Image: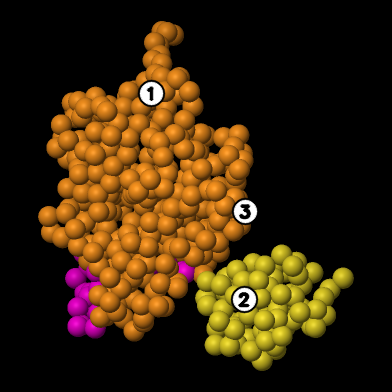
Chain colours: A yellow, B orange
Amino acid sequence: MAATQKEIVDGLAEIVNEIAGIPTEDVELDKSFTDDLDVDSLSMVEVVVAAEERFSVKIPDDDVKNLKTVGDAAEYILKHQD
Amino acid sequence: MSKIKARKGAPYARILGVGGYRPVRVVPNEVILEKIDSSDEWIRSRSGIETRHWANDEETVAAMAIEASGKAIADAGVTAEQIGAVVVSTVSHFSQTPAIATEIADKLGTDKAPAFDISAGCAGFGYGLTLAKGMVVEGSAEYVLVIGVERLSDLTDLEDRATAFLFGDGAGAVVVGPSDEPHIGPTVWGSEGDKNETIKQTIPWNTFRIGDLSHLPLDSEGNVKFPAITQEGQAVFRWAVFEMAKVAQQALEASGITADDLDVFIPHQANVRIIDSMVKTLKLPEHVTVARDIRTTGNTSAASIPLAMERLLATGEAKSGDTALIIGFGAGLVFAATVVTLP
């Protein structure tokens, strides 16, 4: 069953916590991965790959650069998940 | 139909000796920062690199290769006359022909050993090692010298903040020879030419034949930029960490080895972040020594694995007889992974 937006954000929070050590409660829709959450361009790739596995979605490299905020990523996953 | 006589070499092959050469000049991040808007902290956090070596005019590709080879030959306990073939992997030898390997073979004092260059980017050492193993077992050479050598400072765009800090110069060499037992496992190797744009030279050499160069990019002083190596960082990182971890796993399985059996992991020294992520993805146990020579050597492409191997042995972090997983990956995209016993 497809994940809801809340489930996706909660999942992203766990992933960001695991990869960048950011507290899960800091991962909110309007937060920028690079500016607010200390996720640099290489860690972003790790976040994306973990999100792909968790939500059964493909996020090509060309689309990764458009995912600036947690909200962008959640919306992308919501739209593209199986 | 006439019967053709075949030749048989040794039952198996092994690495008998290793040698490295690092240029005299050590270049700290402060020097890189003279031409790009970045910081020491940024470079270290993105790549792990603190210093790299850059060659001077005397430290040519051939000169560095000869230095490293001399040490490898001595370490192997053989003589130059016994070297039956010389395989050089490089992308930074600037004369298209002849191959630099012939000059190296001659200056080392080999007895007209067959010598040739291969172009397999950062997987070049693994490709060369695989060829060498084949030659030793087939009998076309008893001892093969495999050299990875690069002067990547010549192919670095010092005004590109994504790559200016990345590359270094140096040479690493091994001697591969006969063995009664297998000490080089099956190679898992391949190419993915559909990704050939992700790491590449910015401008092909023949662009310079065209009289009008005005369409070419200029540097800050208005000069036409020399060709350099460029890459799509995120795409390369994803491929290197997640796809190459699978290849490394396949190499372990092909050798009948588990991660628990490993003593040492020597991945291509591309970026410390790639190395750390691969270690995590492969779930390597704590006892495995991981090469992180990149911190003080930078990315030296084909030279990085033998240079890292030489340093681990020299510092005592690894010892002769240890079982090591090596994996090279880079422009092509190409890859090669295998398990070896350290010399």
Q: Mark 2 points at which residue?
A: A21
Question: Is B85 drawn above or below residue B337 in the view shown?
Answer: above
The amino acid at mark 2 is Gly
Q: Mark 3 points at which residue?
A: B283
Dividing the image into 4 quarters, which one contains the C terminus of chain A? bottom right
Quick one: which residue is furthest to the front in this view?
A: B316
Q: Say which of marks 1 and 3 sits in front.
A: 3
Check whether the beta carbons of the residues at disc 2 and disc 3 lie within 8 A of each other.
Answer: no
Whole-percent x, y for residue B249 in the image = 60, 46
Residue beneath the point at 28% across and 70% down:
B28
Of the two numbered discs 1 and 3 on the same chain, state the one appearing first in sequence. Answer: 1
Magenta range: B209-233
* Residue B255 magenta-highlighted: no
Q: Can residue B154 be seen in this view?
A: no
Residue B258 in the figure: left or right of residue B25: right
Whole-percent x, y for residue B89 in the image = 32, 46
* Residue B213 magenta-highlighted: yes
Residue B320 in the figure: left or right of residue A25: left
Q: Is mark 1 on a helix, strand or loop?
A: strand
Residue beneath the point at 68% across and 73% down:
A15
